[in-house]
Image (cartoon, rainbow, N blue to C red):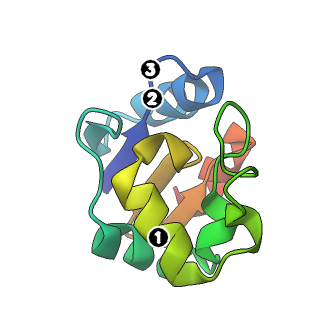
Amino acid sequence: MKATIWHNPKCSKSRQALATLEEHPDIDLEIVEYLKNPPSRDTLAQLYRTAGMKPADGLRLSGTDAKERGLPDADDEEVLDAMAADPKLIERPLVQTGKGVRLCRPPEKIKEIL
């Protein structure tokens, strides 16, 4: 199985999700440090669509200015534009496998797609 994790190594939840993936030797793992290599706006839109989430549900509020910018109440297009321009606004970790996409907060949610 192939899995991609949009990862921030400074985040404990992201590290926990990565550790879970690494416990499975049958997983062909791609690790994307999204702050260094941010996903495109189209990729973000597809990830949230596949996860059954609105982009605002994947908005990182802690440690960002998302609230001050009114992003929690913004439309999907504005949220995606903001995330694409400033990847710090992307909540992590996002994990994609052939079984779907999950925002793995809590990290145990990863089990739903393994």
* Mark 1 or mark 2, earlier in chain: 2
The answer to whether residue 2 is left or right of residue 80 is: left
Q: Say whether marks 3 and 2 touch (CB < 8 Å).
A: yes
- Give x and y (percent) for residue 67: 75, 52
Is residue 5 shown left or right of residue 109? left
- Give residue 56's quadrant in the image: bottom right
Residue at which label 3 appears: 9
Q: Amino acid at mark 2?
A: Asn
Q: Is residue 92 visible?
A: yes
- The label on residue 8 is 2
For label 2, the SS is: loop
Pointer 1 with pointer 2, Cβ within 8 A: no
Of 113 and 71, which appears nearest the observer?
71
* Residue lying at 44% horizontally and 20% vertically, measured from the top left: 9
- Residue 80 is marked as 1
Any part of residue 48 in sight: no
User: Could you tell me which secondary element the residue under label 1 belongs to?
Assistant: helix
Residue 15 or residue 69, whichever sits in front = 69
88 up-or-down from 43: above or below: above
> In front: 111, or 36?
36
Give x and y (percent) for residue 8: 45, 29
**Label 1 – label 2 distance at C-alpha:** 19 Å
Indicate the secondary structure of the residue bearing disc 3. loop
Mark 3 neighbour density, 10 Å: few (under 14) some (14–19) many (20 or more) = some
Residue at 67% x, 64% y is 71
Answer left or right for 31 relative to 55: left
Most foreground residue, 24 or 73: 73
Number of the front mark, 1 or 2: 1
x, y (%) of residue 39? 29, 56
Q: Amino acid at mark 3?
A: Pro
